Every structure is written in C-alpha cells, then in structure tokens.
Image: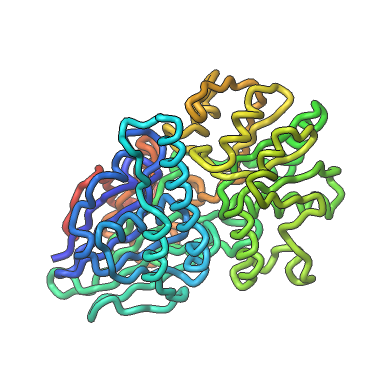
Amino acid sequence: MTTLTFLGATGTVTGSRYLLEIHGHRYLVDAGLFQGEKELRLRNWEPFSVEARSVEAVILTHAHIDHTGYLPRLVREGFHGKVYVTPATKRLLSVLLPDAAHLQEEEARYANKVGSTKHTPALPLFDTADASRALSLVSAVPFATPFTLHPGCTLTFHRQGHILGAAAVELRFKGRGGEPTSLYFSGDVGRYAVPILKPPEAFPGATYLVVESTYGDRVHDAGDPREQLAEVIVSTASRGGVVLIPAFAVGRTQEILYYLREMEDDGDITLPPVYLDSPMAREATAIYRQWLSEHDAETRFVESEEEPFLPSNLRIVATVSESKALNALPGPAVIISASGMATGGRILHHLRHRLPHPQNTVLFVGFQAKGTRGRRILEGEATVKIFGEHVPVGAQIAHISSLSAHADREELLVWARQAQTPPQKVFVTHGEPEASQQFAELIRKELGWLCHLPHYGEQVNL
C-alpha cells in the first residue's frame, strides 16, 4: 500500500513536507519550516506526525529554508536516516542550516534578554549541534541519475532552475497491483529566459503530480526587471535616500548583483555604493560563482572569466560592527540584506532605522508570504512591529515581481503541458488558497487533468 500525507505547503507557501509510505518504507519529501502567521509558526513546535526515527530517508528539492529548515528539528526528534539532495544543494545546506540554527539561538537569547517570551527560558527550535548532525546525514545524488531507495523504488532529480541545485523529485515504484507507478514532486519551478541558471526541465509526465502554485493566480510584470531596478535606484538617489532590499540570500541576491553588474558594464547608470550585509548571502554568492556548470550558456561575463556578481561599487559587510555602522550611512546607497520576507536577520535592524524616512525606498524582490512582516509592509500597513517596537512606515515601498524566482501561472502551464503522458491525478500545493484554487481550475480547463487541493494533514492512497 502507498500513501501520501500532506504535512505542509497546504494553503500556504511555507512548511513544505510530504510524508510518503511505500509498502512499509517511509520517506519525507522536503522538511521545511513554517513561516508567516503565528498559527503556522506554531506548527514547527508540534511533535512530528510519526516517530522521526521511523523515517528512512529525507529527500530535499532545494536548499531554501521553507523546504529544508525543519531538518535539524527532525534530527533532534530522532531522525537518523539519509538525506538525499543534489550536489549544489548539499553545498548550500552547509551554509544555510548553520545560519538558521544561529538565528534560532539568537532569537531565543534576545527574547530571554528583553523578556519578550511567555516561556522561561525561551529555547531555540534547534541549535547548531542539531544542524551539524543533520549535515552529517546528507548525501548528494546528481541530476538525471536514478538512485535506488529500496529494491523496486528509484529516485531521480530533474533540474528546476529555481535556485542553484533546485530539483524536481521523481519516484518510481510498483503500485498496488504491481504496476509501474511514478510520483513527481515539482518542488519550486523556476522561470524561463532569466539570467544565471539553466531553465527548468519540462514535466515529463507521471502517474501522480504534486505541483507548486505560488503564483498560480497571476502573471509576472512583463517589464524589464533591470530597467525597473535602475529606476528605483535613480529615483531614490535623487532624494538622497537609501534603497533597502530585503533579499533571499540564495537566488535573489545573486540575480540583483548580476543586474547591477550588467548595468555598470553597459553604462546604464552611475551606481551608488552597494552594501551586501548578509554573511549567508556572501557565502552563497561565492558558491554560485564556483558552480559554473549550473549557469545558463547565455550568462554574461562567465566565458570571459569576469566576475558576474561583483559590481565595482560593492562593499561586503563582514562584521556586526560594520553592519551597525550602516545606520549612520548617508544616501545615496543600496543595502542588500536578508531575510527576503523580513522575518529575521540583519534586515530587521536596517528596517527599524530606515523605514520611517520618506527619502528611502524599501524594495521587495520576492514573494512575501501571508503574515510575514514583508507582506504587511507591502500591503500598506502604517506601522510594523520590529523588536517589540512599532516602527512607522514612511519610506517609499516598491516591488519588482519579475525578479521572483518562481514561475508564474503561464510559465507553470508551459512547464506542465509538455508532459508526454498526462497524470491520473494532480495535487496542487505550495500556494495561498486563492492561488492554488485558480491554478487548479486552469489545469482542469487547459489540460483536462483531475486536480485535488489537499488540506493540512490529509492522507491519500496512491
């Protein structure tokens, strides 16, 4: 008997977790943290739905924390099996998981210091020791290379282009009557015709498909993101302000740096000083530069061995004291810092300092999940709470949706419609309710496929 249980990414874009049981073998596809609203974040603290030690292996689609950040907690609860990832994802995890653990420890330490917790003492969800144990379990499997999980069941990673190392997961096994069955997890589908990474491989077809729907209800702005970025920088500089960019350390930061490097190379604008204030983004950018085999053939500067991610005005902020010194920095300038949804990290200190002042611009370049600080700012709230303080929103707020790493509605449809054989059933996940519902309706209308929107904790028989 084969069952699939949806333990996350249902009605939300976070907490991606799918528990798969195949004839007595138990696997978890993705182990993500829930982010955003408190109701979701509290799920991270709930005991895992089965004994963690009973899970034979975890399979991760890519390195983003909403797909991997629960892994150290799962290890703390007793998981000790293998973790299968692509080679580039393994390298990125060596940076992301320790950083996530450090943030957990810092948040607990700060809560205890200021007394902003109902728990005495406040504890981290996991710590650096848990992250280290998790990393010791990670094994790399190359793209397009079938790997045997157990006799009769193979795993294959397919390139998805979302971030470095991102993959779709294809599992092949024998069904109830011994018939060949395949289950395909899209992971996060990347975009076409964007710089740096190779485009996603088309969905080849499968018996069952689990597909993301982050932007299933909309199409990205058709404008040139490089031109839009230049416009924000120029207009903010004219006011003597600072452009503050909350950016995901892996993926968005590298694309922004790439566009800035292109602008400078082409003489589009005179760049003000650019500050990269994220230790994780700094390391991730170095990893992107090392993995040239993942880059699209059209990526500029690579063949000439020039640095694609280092505009001449870039300053790398290394220490906490250097980060704090940016508070006194006059404009014009650009500050890029994590996290991308303004849920934690150094960006919060910059927001507290820059957000009240109208000469500045806060520029969002990725999806902002419901309930996150980034979403509240983007939706026009007059004040946001940062470190227990209500900070007024006086800065200009901008958003470049075309800088998103997620395929939009039309790109998802292009990705899916190339299937050689249609799936018997599609499970639409990883989207807010309206986005998932609209994308499911689009699939039914355009492709004629049977769709289901699973709810949290739902188990289905395959």
Name the residue: 64% across, 20% down.
394
Name the residue: 86% across, 43% down.
270
Using residue 202 as the reference point, say whether residue 336 is left or right of it. right
Quadrant position of the N terminus in the picture? bottom left
How many dots with numbers? 0
In the rendered view, tell whether residue 7 sits above or below residue 397: below
Using residue 337 as the reference point, say whether residue 311 is left or right of it. right
On the image, the x and y values in percent for residue 50 come to 18, 56
On the image, the x and y values in percent for residue 453 come to 28, 44
39 and 203: which is toward the camera: 39
Name the residue: 35% across, 58% down.
71
State which quadrant residue 242 falls in: top right
Is the image coloured rainbow, by chain, by secondary structure, or in one colour? rainbow
Name the residue: 38% across, 73% down.
156
Answer whether residue 419 is visible to the viewer in this image: no
In the rendered view, tell whether residue 131 sits above or below residue 407: below
In the rendered view, tell whether residue 149 sits above or below residue 345: below
Quadrant position of the C terminus in the picture? bottom left
Using residue 287 as the reference point, say whether residue 70 is left or right of it. left
On the image, the x and y values in percent for residue 344 come to 50, 40
State which quadrant residue 77 falls in: bottom left
On the image, the x and y values in percent for residue 205 come to 36, 65
Using residue 353 as the reference point, say whether residue 64 is left or right of it. left
Answer whether residue 137 is visible to the viewer in this image: yes
State which quadrant residue 206 falls in: bottom left
343 and 458: which is toward the camera: 343
